Each structure stands twice: as structure tokens, then as C-alpha cells.
Amino acid sequence: MSNTSNIIIETRNLSKRFKDVQAVNSLNMKVRKGEIYGFLGPNGAGKTTTIKMMMGLTHPSAGEVLIGGKKVSGDSVSIKKDIGYLPEVVAFYDNLTPLQTLHFFCELKGVDKSIAEPLLKEVGLENVLHRKVGTFSKGMNQLLGIAQTMIGKPSIYILDESMAGLDARWVKVVREKIKMLNRQGATILFSSHILTEVQNLCNRVAIINKGKLIAEDTVSNLSSYLHIKPRLEIIIAGLNGRVPDFIFNVEGVENADAKGDTLFVTCDTAVRIQVITALKEKGLNIQNFKTIEPTLEEAFVKLISKDEGDV
């Protein structure tokens, strides 16, 4: 996978400065062919600015973006034709219907208009084909935006907050759509604040803060690198929110807290049996237990804290 021919999107020392603000700072990242790549960072980290430079919508102050090995510029029409792009803020003409909107984009891309109605059905807008877009909710606009990205069957998708404004039902629709496009061979880069979705979907993630790349790896590798340990979730009858003091005497236990009859113990994987044994020996009634693996949210928070000198 390290072969350069497998790199579809690459930034090289990419930087963007707006007067006194360094929005993106010497960013180097590589998206491999056929992967789903999560692009994360707190608000103001530089994600949207980076994506706009990928699309040639704003020019770098320094560095460059390459897509398919070709340098992106403002007039890179041939490169953009093979990209399905969803901006952070989706905006369409209020006086057009979704069908008319997709017909407009089909004309721009030189694609047969007959694909418009099936695409709208795919994202769940089949009952509002002839309703004015100006009456749409934010979530409906988002779904229309996703339909627009699929015009022409691009091989690359760049999605900036693709699930913003969607309720749980439509988040699931978009998730399955991303999976389907990826199974069909598409490379997908998407930014999102819904970390559970990123964790469930992505092969790798990049995390940026203050315009700088602070991590790029799989979720499991990030957790290992940060020494984030799994947690035991143990249901104990009659616990009533009390943490047994003796639990901290078990070597390898890092932390413990309780809520109701559930005890949460952060510990080394090898220590789990000792924890359960210690609880049983003290006569506590264990009704159930399970291991909760480290999450992307934990890795994200820890990385940002490390970058800002909080830990």
C-alpha cells in the first residue's frame, strides 16, 4: 500500500494563511486508493480550508495538493470531474425543485438527466421531487447535496460534514451509501463531528489541530500509541453508585467509577480476570460484565490535549 500509485489524494507542506491567522500549517497527508479516510479536528482546526484547497476553491499560501498525481489549481476541470464534492454549507437555488436542481448539475457535468430521479430516490427524496428546494429543511438539503455528489459516478468523494443536520434514520442511509460507494471502488475522504460514525466507517483517520497534522493512522493503532486501555463494564446487584475501595489494590487497575449498579474499571487487558476474581472474593453479586474497547473519541480528546499541552 505504500506504492505512490496507490495515493489518490496527497497534500505536500500545504499551508494557508488569512492575514494574522495560520489556518493550515505545512500539512502532509496521504489518502490511499479505495479507502475511507476520516478527517477530524476541533472547530477551527483547518479542515474546511484544507478541503477547499483540495477542490481548488481557495489557493494555498504555500505547498500543494495532488489528486491522482496531478497538481490541483483553480482551473483543474479534468480533476474535478471525477470528484463528488459536498461542501460544509449546502446551498441550492430556492426556486428550483430537487429534480430541476439535479438536471442543472447533470448539464454542468455532461451527464444524461435520466439519472436524476433514481438518485433522488436513493437518498429518500422521492416524495418531494417537485417541491421547491426553498421549503426544504437542513437535513433535506443535505440529502439533496449527497445525491448531487453521485452524478457521473465519480471515483473520489470529498464530503465535508456529510451527516450534518440529519436525524438517526438518515445518518444510517448516508452511512450505508458511503459503504456501498466504497465497495464499488470509490475513494472517500470525509470530515465529521460524529466520531462514532468515523470509527465505524474509516480505514484510517487524520486528526488536525490548529492547522497541523497531529496523527494519521487506524483507530486501533492510535489507541495503542496513546496507551488508551479498554474498560470493564460490570453490573453488580446493589452497588448503588459506590466504587469498592479494594479494586484499586489490583495491580494494573488505572481508574474506576460507578453509576447505579454498573462499575466501570479501566485496566490492562491481562488484569480483567483478576478484577472479576477480586470482586467475587469480596462477595459482590456480579450479574454481567463486558469489555468496552477504546473509542475514537478517547483518542481524539487525548491527542488534542497532548497537542495543547494539557497532559
Image (cartoon, grey):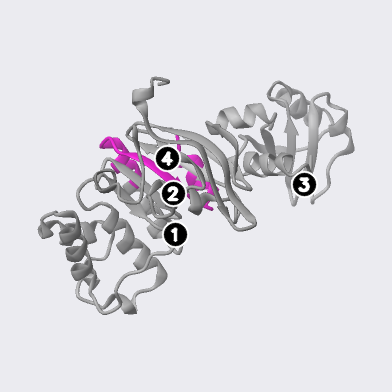
Q: Which residue is mark 4?
A: 65
Magenta residue span: 178-203
User: Could you tell which of marks 2 and 3 lies nearer the N-terminus?
Assistant: 2
Q: Name the residue: 44% across, 49% down.
A: 53
> Which is more toward the observer, 61 or 296?
61
Label 4 is placed on what type of residue? Val
Of badges 1 and 3, nearer the viewer stands: 1
User: Could you tell which of marks 2 and 1 lies nearer the N-terminus?
Assistant: 2
Of badges 2 and 3, nearer the viewer stands: 2
Q: Is residue 204 left or right of residue 85?
A: right
Of badges 2 and 1, nearer the viewer stands: 2
Cα gap from disc 4 to disc 2, whole angstroms: 7 Å
Q: Which residue is mark 2?
A: 53
Is 12 situated above or below 270?
below
Residue 182: percent from the left, percent from the top?
32, 38
Q: Is residue 49 left or right of residue 221?
A: left
User: Could you tell which of marks 4 and 2 lies nearer the N-terminus?
Assistant: 2
Report helix, strand or loop for mark 3: strand
Cα gap from disc 3 to disc 4, whole angstroms: 48 Å
Cα gap from disc 2 to disc 3, whole angstroms: 47 Å
Q: Name the residue: 52% across, 46% down.
A: 196
Task: Find out whether the residues at labels 4 and 2 contact each other: C-beta distance under 8 Å.
Answer: yes
Residue 190: percent from the left, percent from the top?
43, 47
Residue 259: percent from the left, percent from the top?
75, 50
Quadrant of the image occupied by residue 224: top right
Q: Is residue 296 left or right of residue 106?
A: right
> Which is more toward the observer, 125 or 103?
103
Q: Name the residue: 63% across, 55% down.
A: 21
